[in-house]
Amino acid sequence: MASPATSRSLDRFAQGKLEDLEARSLRRRLIETDRYGPALARRAGRELISFCCNDYLNLSHRKEVKEAARAALERYGAGSGASRLVTGNHPLFRTLEKRLARLKETDDCVIFGSGYLANLGIVPALAREGDLVLADELSHACLLSGTKLSGAETRIFRHNDLDHLKTLLEEERAKHRHCLILTDGVFSMDGDLAPVEEMGELARAHDAWLMSDDAHGIGVLAGGKGSSFIGGRKADVPLQMGTLSKAIGSYGGYLCASQPVVDFIRTRARTLIYSTGLPPASVAASIAALDLIEADPAFAALPVKKAKAFTRALNLPEAESPIVPILMGDPDKTLAASALLEEEGFLVTAIRPPTVPEGTARLRFTFTAEHEDKDIERLTAIIRDKILIDRAAE
Ligand SMILES: *Cc1c(COP(=O)(O)O)cnc(C)c1O
């Protein structure tokens, strides 16, 4: 047991950190939120229309998806009992892996416990000391955590800057054994797309391995195939990673890649080996969600269509994904704007550092298939009349 003195210093440490964060409006709190239907959430007894769920197709509440989860729960139990490499590899995993490999046009696929766990496992399995990792500066936190864990030398390139990436490759590639290039396919806090086609060409020219994290692309871009398939062509992205927790409406992470790569990851990624397999119900839900997406590409396209209508109405740069940021800069202003929208019945979370760079606190809107046009129009009017006007006045 810790001595009272130790625990006092522990509590003092935590308290001091909290006070510092509070003073900078950067403390975060969990708020109980009851999501009970498509794009609807109840907080403190109030019904709100949510523009901050990543459940882009509202599939987490879809009847067919819930029924598939329920059937798997009854047949295979509530949990999977062990790591997939021990006894946790229930039959639904294979079905889902084959479905994802087909969607992403790769040999095979491997499922992880979450997107975060996938990146924490994949990057250190592929890169270590003596290797080079080049990552976009706005890459998701878990890509950067995986990179840190890998021990590889890391260089960050400016956001979506192909020239900077090319320079780093020319200067650094030859000094290292292997080189891994990391980017989000759709940037999670900005909603813009990476130029994966050009990055694939650069990677190939320098014998580097490109990995795209398509957490926000699968299910909603290119008929559900994701950001590596825009314009009907498949970009040369040999490592296609993503999550099942956003448009797929369930939980879990995946990597789609060639047979040797997938087989290698299955045997070497620590977050796959030492973590329990996903619950059967989650896997079954993902399979059912993919059925719905593949059967109805027009439905899959709705979130981006609605996001585009929103950006057009507000004269913002045209949305490329279901994610639209409105930059406010200052955390206090962002919190105030979020509170104002909540008063009006809309749930839009304030995104603050360190999730986004210092000075770029923002409102982040996500659009879903079942948002009603009349609600989007009312939201747009409030933003135009009450938020953008203030911002422009500064
Ligand atoms: C959400 C997200 C992840 C993490 O996926 P989880 O399945 O939620 O752990 C990884 N990468 C990006 C770009 C994300 O947006």
Image (tube, grey):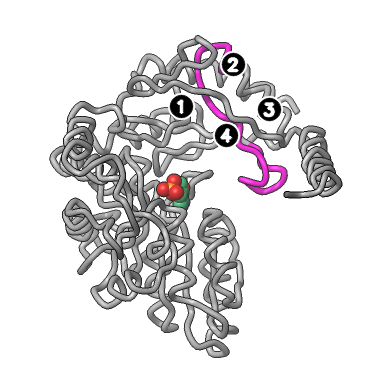
Label 1 – label 3 distance at C-alpha: 23 Å
Q: Residues within 10 Å of mark 3 (few under 14, many from 20)?
A: few
Q: Label 2, on which residue?
A: 385
Q: Are marks 1 and 4 in contact (CB under 8 Å)?
A: no
Q: Residue 136's spot in the image, x, y percent?
A: 54, 62
From what the image shows, is residue 244 above or below residue 200? above
Q: Could you tell me which residue is drawn at 51 percent across and 68 percent down?
A: 162
Q: Label 3, on which residue?
A: 392
Which is in the foreground here, disc 1 or disc 4? 1
Q: Secondary structure at mark 3?
A: helix
Mark 2 belongs to which amino acid?
A: Asp
Q: Could you tell me which residue is drawn at 40 percent across and 38 percent down?
A: 322
> Does the magenta-highlighted stretch encompass residue 289?
no
Q: Name the foreground residue: 79 vs 22.
A: 79
- The residue at label 2 has a CB less than 8 Å from ligand 1: no
Q: Are marks 2 and 4 in contact (CB under 8 Å)?
A: no
Of the image marks 2 and 4, the number of the one nearer the N terminus: 4
Of the image marks 4 and 3, the number of the one nearer the N terminus: 4
Label 2 – label 4 distance at C-alpha: 14 Å
Q: Label 4, on which residue?
A: 326
Q: Secondary structure at mark 4?
A: strand
Q: Label 1, on which residue?
A: 51
Label 1 – label 4 distance at C-alpha: 13 Å
Q: Residue 383's spot in the image, x, y percent?
A: 56, 21
Q: Are marks 2 and 3 in contact (CB under 8 Å)?
A: no
> Does the magenta-highlighted stretch encompass residue 346?
yes
